[in-house]
Image (tube, rainbow, N blue to C red):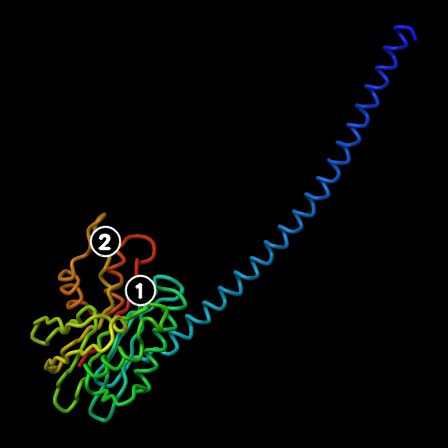
């Protein structure tokens, strides 16, 4: 074989090798395209499923939020008159409140705040409120606030509530005597504005419900007169920053609250301090006018 023939043979062999590589690359390219289309189809289907799931969860959260608001009491037109406002910081919060006649002479007033947010906090909040509203605590005189909180503490130990606990202020107003008996468990004081302009904060010592067994809660007493106004609050009503790292002083909040004409006015004031965006915690304010 001449030198030229050898070079031609070598060239043909190289050409065949290149053709083979091209065919392999072409097959690989086609497979990649087909695989890529399959992946794109899978991604598109997964995205649609995610959208369907998000829509369903959003609808369920809305339904849950509507239920929570549905169990809140309607404002009282008869004495004592009530106004309230609940503004959750997320779809579902842990605040709730209520009031109801225990008997012809006594009316219960209460506001509670479950730690955290979301479905778990909302469920515990609703359950506790329903227990109070229905009087479903055995061997408990619901006219005795300290006794009620002790019974709640035994009924809702945090180890059986996914380590959640709640704070509460519970009071009982006696119409015939103008007496208000109250107790609190780790909850912010309620604010009583007397008709003569004096402002009192009403609270008793005691840790949050569910944190420790066998707790005894003390009942305190205040006199209620004509045109007095009582405000039950959650900590979300005043725990906002006035500047980076500086929180609104409770005394400042109490002063502004005692001068307010409605819960909505207080919310607008707190929002102005907080700035744009949602409040850091649920805002709950129940005002009782005597």
Camera-nearest residue between 244 and 121 = 121
Residue at image location 30% in from the left, 58% down from the top? 280
Query: Which residue is painted at 71% across and 40% down in the image?
Result: 33
Residue at (57% x, 61% y) in the render: 52
> As drawn, is 70 to the left or to the right of 271?
right
Residue 89 sits in which quadrant?
bottom left
Residue 112 image point, x, y percent: 27, 73
Circle 2 packing at 10 Å, graded few (<14), some (14-19), many (20+), is some
Residue corresponding to mark 2: 241
Q: Secondary structure at mark 1?
A: loop
Alpha carbon distance from label 1 to label 2:
15 Å
Residue 30: image location, x then y, percent: 75, 38
Q: Nearer the viewer, residue 83 or 244?
A: 244
Relative image position of residue 219 (x, y in whole percent): 14, 80
The earlier-in-sequence mark between 1 and 2 is 2
> Of helix, strand and loop, which one carries label 2?
strand
- Would you name the residue on which mark 1 appears? 282
Q: Is the residue marked by circle 1 packed among few (<14), some (14-19), or many (20+) residues within 10 Å?
A: many
């Amino acid at each position: 074989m001449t030198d030229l023939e050898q070079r031609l043979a070598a060239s043909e062999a190289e050409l065949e090798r290149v053709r083979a590589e091209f065919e392999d690359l072409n097959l690989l390219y086609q497979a990649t395209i087909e695989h890529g289309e399959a992946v794109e189809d899978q991604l598109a289907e997964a995205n649609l499923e995610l959208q369907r799931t998000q829509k369903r969860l959003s609808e369920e959260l809305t339904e849950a939020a509507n239920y929570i608001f549905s169990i809140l009491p309607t404002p009282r037109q008869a004495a004592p008159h009530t106004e309230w406002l609940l503004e959750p910081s997320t779809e579902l919060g842990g605040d709730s409140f209520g009031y109801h006649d225990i008997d012809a002479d006594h009316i219960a007033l209460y506001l509670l705040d479950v730690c955290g947010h979301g479905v778990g906090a909302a469920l515990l909040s609703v359950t506790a409120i329903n227990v109070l509203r229905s009087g479903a605590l055995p061997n408990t005189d619901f006219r005795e606030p300290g006794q009620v909180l002790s019974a709640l503490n035994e009924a809702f130990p945090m180890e059986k509530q996914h380590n959640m606990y709640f704070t509460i202020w519970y009071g009982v107003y006696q119409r015939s005597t103008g007496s208000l008996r109250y107790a609190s468990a780790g909850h912010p004081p309620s604010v009583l504005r007397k008709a003569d302009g004096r402002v009192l904060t009403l609270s008793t010592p005691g840790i949050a419900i569910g944190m420790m067994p066998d707790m005894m809660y003390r009942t305190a007493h205040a006199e209620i007169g004509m045109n007095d106004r009582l405000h039950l609050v959650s900590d979300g009503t005043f725990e906002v920053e006035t500047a980076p790292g500086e929180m609104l002083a409770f005394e400042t909040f109490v002063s502004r609250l005692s001068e307010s004409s409605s819960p909505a006015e207080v919310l607008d004031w707190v929002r102005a301090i907080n700035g744009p965006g949602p409040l850091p915690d649920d805002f709950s304010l129940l005002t009782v006018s005597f």
